[in-house]
Image (cartoon, helix red, strand yellow):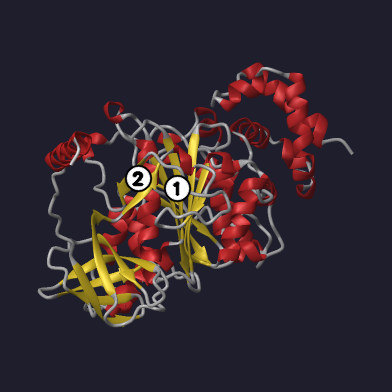
Amino acid sequence: MSAKNREMIAGSLNAYENLTDEFNPEMKVVERGEVLDLAESIAQVSGLPGLGYQELVRIKAEDGTIRTGMAINLDVETASIVLFDDPRGIVSGAEVRRTGRVLDVPVGDGLIGRVTDGLGRPLDDKGPVEFSERWPVEREAPEIMDRQAVTVPLQTGILAVDSMIPIGRGQRELIIGDRQCGKTAIAVDAIVNQKGKNVTAIYCAVGIAMSTVAEVISDLRANAAMDYSIVVAASGEATAGLNFITPFAATSMAEYFMARGRDVLIVYDDLIHHARSYRELTLLLRRPPGREAFPGDIFYLHSRLLERSTHLVKAKGGGSITALPIAETEAQNIAAYIPTNLISITDGQIYVSPRLFSQAQLPAIDVLKSVSRVGGQAQLAGLRALSGDLRLSYAQFEELETFSRLDTALDESTRQTLERGRRVREILKQPLLSPLSAAQQILLLTVLNAGVFDKVPAEGINARRKDFFIEVNVAVPSLMERLEAGEVPGTEEETAIIAAAKKIFNRT
């Protein structure tokens, strides 16, 4: 053997020795189990002794695709897995693998403008979702000492709400009523009204038709609201498991922004479908049913979800999550099991009446059955000063209107009260996706309290409303900006407002 060949062999041996010195193999235990049984969206598996509660698992279907699920029941030898994907194709003996991580969801600014499901997977055509971190779907609510009072208003742009049922940033206000009465429309109007107000909006659809979700997305895009919004959707065709975790995933996305000192508005549409999905899961798991077959922890389910919405103290960033959960009632029965649970958890409710809806009083908000437990603490000073007795006078009007149908002989005082009430009802009407700014609401209430509308036919008020706003802006250019900040109009400014109103509304 030549000297050259010996050198080459020696060099190869030295390189091999160096490679073996650097290579330190690590032993890793991989737990693989198998599916024992499948019932709808619940799979019973075995062979995963180290599986943790709410751990994400992957199941291999017959066609080789991977389905995801979460551990929800842990027994001695088996575990129950709630599936998030279509269970078809999963058979007995299918391979199940642990992931070693609790179910989490992507969070970050990259989600803004996107449509995803409850696992953060994209449902639009914009490619993969960009995210900063992954946060657990289930997180503890902020401690009491980390919360501060709700004092900053969240304007919905709906006069009936902002004047008589005010909502503050960090509040939880339930929207409740029968189906097809405009509950979602109120929530979408609130999202649209956050344009330019430094609020991130999240619309969370649970168990509703994807056609309805598509309409909401279309409305948000048409009003440039998707620029600051995220849509998280689980349709009625999705598995009960995906419907179950979707609101929690959307809340984790919201908490990311709140932790960074930002304000978030989140809409849950709706929690009745969410409760039904959870009931389906628990019955498949053979947990004991209670009232209306719902499990005993149904109250805890929604309370641990909604308690995550709050206003943090400045030491924690000062961010907030305002929740607008939606609940569908049957035959106006707000005393049913789930609605009463939600009413007791939230800080008030906006009741949407089918009677008002049938009378074309839109939005069909029944102000007598609606309440905000935060009240004037989170209301702009200008609105609070002008709407102090509006709710009481409107309630008196509705009572008088009911009794006046039985008697045509009315005294002048009663007649005037009825005429004023009809005009209040008229200005509370708003077209869909036409929110009013705080300044515009203050202008309308100023004119109403001054009695200018009393001599105007009720039907003609809303037709000239836009012209009135333009006239005021021309007459007092700097006024609108100050009113938008919630200031109370001064005496001279009020005189100018009334003069502009008389010019517009009293013309023939």
Tell me the residue at 31%/81% (across/down).
38
- Looking at the image, residue 260 sits to the left or right of residue 159; the answer is left
- Horizontal and vertical percent for residue 281? 31, 74
Kindly tell me whether residue 206 is visible in this rendering.
yes
Q: Nearer the viewer, residue 265 or 249?
A: 249
| Residue, disc 1 | 266
Tell me the kind of residue under disc 1: Ile
- Looking at the image, residue 38 sits to the left or right of residue 326; the answer is left
Q: Nearer the viewer, residue 39 or 387?
A: 39
Tell me the kind of residue under disc 2: Ser
Q: Nearer the viewer, residue 289 or 206?
A: 206
- Horizontal and vertical percent for residue 408? 71, 63
Question: Considering only vertical position in the picture, is 489 above or below 308?
Answer: above
On residue 40, the disc is none
- Horizontal and vertical percent for residue 463? 79, 44
Distance, label 1 to label 2, CA atoms, is 9 Å
Proximity of marks 1 and 2: CB atoms separated by less than 8 Å: yes
- Horizontal and vertical percent for residue 216? 59, 55
| Residue, disc 2 | 309
- Looking at the image, residue 188 sits to the left or right of residue 506; the answer is left
Tell me the residue at 41%/75% (across/down).
63
